Image: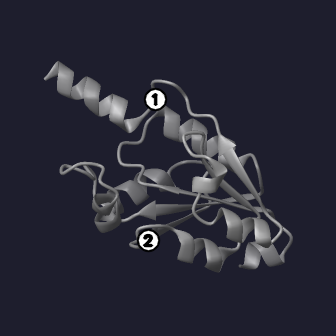
Amino acid sequence: MEWRQSGLKVVFTNGVFDLLHRGHVEYLAEARSLGDRLVVGVNDDQSTRALGKGPDRPLNPVDDRLVVLAGLEAVDLLVPFHEETPLELITLLRPQVLVKGGDYTEEEVVGAAEVRADGGEVVLVRLRKGHSTSNLLERVRESS
Protein backbone atom coordinates (compact mmCIF):
# COMPACT_ATOMS: atom_id res chain seq x y z
CA MET A 1 0.00 0.00 0.00
CA GLU A 2 1.33 3.41 -0.97
CA TRP A 3 0.60 4.98 2.43
CA ARG A 4 2.66 2.41 4.24
CA GLN A 5 5.50 2.73 1.72
CA SER A 6 5.59 6.48 2.34
CA GLY A 7 6.01 5.94 6.09
CA LEU A 8 2.43 6.55 7.20
CA LYS A 9 1.02 4.35 9.95
CA VAL A 10 -2.03 2.50 8.60
CA VAL A 11 -4.81 1.41 10.95
CA PHE A 12 -7.48 -1.11 9.96
CA THR A 13 -10.83 -1.99 11.45
CA ASN A 14 -13.97 -3.56 10.09
CA GLY A 15 -17.64 -4.01 10.76
CA VAL A 16 -21.18 -3.84 9.44
CA PHE A 17 -21.96 -0.24 10.50
CA ASP A 18 -25.63 -0.76 9.67
CA LEU A 19 -27.17 2.10 11.64
CA LEU A 20 -24.44 4.63 12.25
CA HIS A 21 -24.59 5.93 15.82
CA ARG A 22 -22.45 7.67 18.43
CA GLY A 23 -20.69 4.44 19.44
CA HIS A 24 -19.53 3.92 15.84
CA VAL A 25 -18.35 7.50 15.42
CA GLU A 26 -16.36 7.49 18.67
CA TYR A 27 -14.93 4.04 17.91
CA LEU A 28 -13.76 5.10 14.45
CA ALA A 29 -12.29 8.36 15.77
CA GLU A 30 -10.35 6.45 18.42
CA ALA A 31 -9.13 3.94 15.83
CA ARG A 32 -7.98 6.81 13.58
CA SER A 33 -6.08 8.41 16.46
CA LEU A 34 -3.82 5.35 16.57
CA GLY A 35 -2.19 6.13 13.23
CA ASP A 36 -2.02 8.34 10.17
CA ARG A 37 -4.66 6.67 7.99
CA LEU A 38 -7.75 4.63 8.82
CA VAL A 39 -8.94 1.91 6.45
CA VAL A 40 -12.38 0.49 7.25
CA GLY A 41 -13.52 -2.86 5.88
CA VAL A 42 -17.30 -2.96 5.57
CA ASN A 43 -19.23 -6.23 5.43
CA ASP A 44 -21.37 -6.32 2.32
CA ASP A 45 -25.01 -7.40 2.57
CA GLN A 46 -24.25 -11.10 1.99
CA SER A 47 -21.51 -11.29 4.63
CA THR A 48 -23.70 -9.34 7.08
CA ARG A 49 -26.44 -11.94 6.72
CA ALA A 50 -23.84 -14.70 7.19
CA LEU A 51 -22.88 -13.15 10.55
CA GLY A 52 -26.31 -14.01 11.89
CA LYS A 53 -27.27 -10.45 12.78
CA GLY A 54 -30.93 -11.30 12.19
CA PRO A 55 -33.29 -11.85 9.26
CA ASP A 56 -33.91 -8.13 8.81
CA ARG A 57 -30.24 -7.17 8.66
CA PRO A 58 -28.67 -5.27 7.19
CA LEU A 59 -31.28 -2.56 7.35
CA ASN A 60 -29.24 -0.40 4.99
CA PRO A 61 -27.61 -1.81 1.85
CA VAL A 62 -23.83 -1.67 1.66
CA ASP A 63 -23.80 1.22 -0.85
CA ASP A 64 -25.80 3.38 1.57
CA ARG A 65 -23.56 2.41 4.50
CA LEU A 66 -20.47 3.33 2.47
CA VAL A 67 -21.85 6.79 1.62
CA VAL A 68 -22.61 7.51 5.29
CA LEU A 69 -19.21 6.28 6.50
CA ALA A 70 -17.43 8.27 3.79
CA GLY A 71 -18.77 11.43 5.41
CA LEU A 72 -16.82 10.81 8.60
CA GLU A 73 -13.61 12.78 9.05
CA ALA A 74 -11.88 9.83 10.72
CA VAL A 75 -12.25 7.52 7.72
CA ASP A 76 -9.62 7.64 4.98
CA LEU A 77 -10.55 4.59 2.91
CA LEU A 78 -13.54 2.22 2.80
CA VAL A 79 -13.30 -1.28 1.39
CA PRO A 80 -16.43 -3.43 1.16
CA PHE A 81 -15.83 -7.17 1.42
CA HIS A 82 -18.01 -10.21 0.84
CA GLU A 83 -16.07 -12.88 2.71
CA GLU A 84 -17.19 -13.97 6.17
CA THR A 85 -14.07 -12.39 7.68
CA PRO A 86 -11.71 -9.61 6.56
CA LEU A 87 -8.62 -11.87 6.72
CA GLU A 88 -7.91 -11.66 2.98
CA LEU A 89 -8.20 -7.86 3.13
CA ILE A 90 -5.96 -7.61 6.20
CA THR A 91 -3.34 -9.83 4.55
CA LEU A 92 -3.41 -7.65 1.44
CA LEU A 93 -3.29 -4.29 3.27
CA ARG A 94 -0.75 -5.26 5.97
CA PRO A 95 -1.85 -2.57 8.47
CA GLN A 96 0.48 -1.66 11.32
CA VAL A 97 -2.49 -1.46 13.72
CA LEU A 98 -5.55 -3.70 13.80
CA VAL A 99 -8.44 -2.38 15.89
CA LYS A 100 -11.54 -4.15 17.21
CA GLY A 101 -14.03 -3.42 19.95
CA GLY A 102 -13.53 -4.44 23.53
CA ASP A 103 -16.20 -7.11 23.17
CA TYR A 104 -13.46 -9.22 21.52
CA THR A 105 -10.37 -10.81 23.00
CA GLU A 106 -7.11 -10.64 21.05
CA GLU A 107 -7.39 -14.37 20.39
CA GLU A 108 -10.78 -13.79 18.70
CA VAL A 109 -9.63 -10.97 16.42
CA VAL A 110 -9.37 -12.18 12.84
CA GLY A 111 -5.99 -11.22 11.41
CA ALA A 112 -4.35 -10.56 14.77
CA ALA A 113 -1.68 -13.21 14.31
CA GLU A 114 -0.87 -11.97 10.81
CA VAL A 115 -0.59 -8.33 11.90
CA ARG A 116 1.61 -9.21 14.89
CA ALA A 117 3.81 -11.47 12.70
CA ASP A 118 4.34 -8.47 10.43
CA GLY A 119 5.47 -6.31 13.37
CA GLY A 120 2.11 -4.63 13.96
CA GLU A 121 -0.13 -4.39 16.99
CA VAL A 122 -3.68 -5.28 17.91
CA VAL A 123 -5.68 -2.73 19.90
CA LEU A 124 -9.01 -3.40 21.58
CA VAL A 125 -11.05 -0.22 21.95
CA ARG A 126 -13.44 0.18 24.87
CA LEU A 127 -17.05 0.14 23.74
CA ARG A 128 -19.42 2.90 24.84
CA LYS A 129 -22.08 1.34 27.04
CA GLY A 130 -25.58 1.72 25.66
CA HIS A 131 -24.37 2.79 22.21
CA SER A 132 -24.85 -0.18 19.92
CA THR A 133 -26.99 -0.97 16.91
CA SER A 134 -28.63 -3.80 18.86
CA ASN A 135 -29.59 -1.40 21.68
CA LEU A 136 -30.90 1.14 19.18
CA LEU A 137 -33.01 -1.46 17.36
CA GLU A 138 -34.38 -2.75 20.66
CA ARG A 139 -35.48 0.77 21.67
CA VAL A 140 -37.15 1.30 18.28
CA ARG A 141 -39.00 -2.01 18.51
CA GLU A 142 -40.15 -1.25 22.08
CA SER A 143 -41.54 2.13 21.03
CA SER A 144 -43.52 0.68 18.11
Q: Disc count in the image?
A: 2
Q: Residue at x 34, y 35 (%)?
A: 134
Residue 99 in view:
yes
Which image quarter is the C terminus in? Answer: top left
Q: Earlier in the sequence, mark 2 or mark 1?
A: 2
Q: Nearer the viewer, residue 98 or 116?
A: 116
Q: Residue at x 79, y 73 (%)?
A: 118
Q: Position of residue 132 (x, y in %)?
A: 42, 34
Of helix, strand and loop, which one carries label 2? strand
Q: Nearer the viewer, residue 138 or 28?
A: 138
Query: Quick check: 59 left or right of 86?
Result: left
Residue 95 in view:
no
Residue type for callout 1: His
- Measure the C-alpha gap from mark 2 to mark 1: 25 Å
Graded by Cα atoms within 10 Å as few (under 14), some (14 to 19) or many (20 or more), the crowding at tag 1 reads some
Q: Nearer the viewer, residue 79 or 54?
A: 54
Residue bearing the label numbered 2: 81
Q: Nearer the viewer, residue 94 or 52?
A: 52
Q: Which mark is residue 105?
A: none
Q: Residue at x 76, y 49 (%)?
A: 34
Question: On the image, which quarter does residue 115 sit in?
Answer: bottom right
Of helix, strand and loop, which one carries label 1? loop
Vertical comparison of 98 with 117: above or below: above
Residue type for callout 2: Phe
Residue bearing the label numbered 1: 131
Q: Which residue appears farthest toward the front when viewing the image?
A: 107
Query: Quick check: 30 left or right of 63?
Result: right
Question: On the image, which quarter does residue 63 sit in?
Answer: bottom left
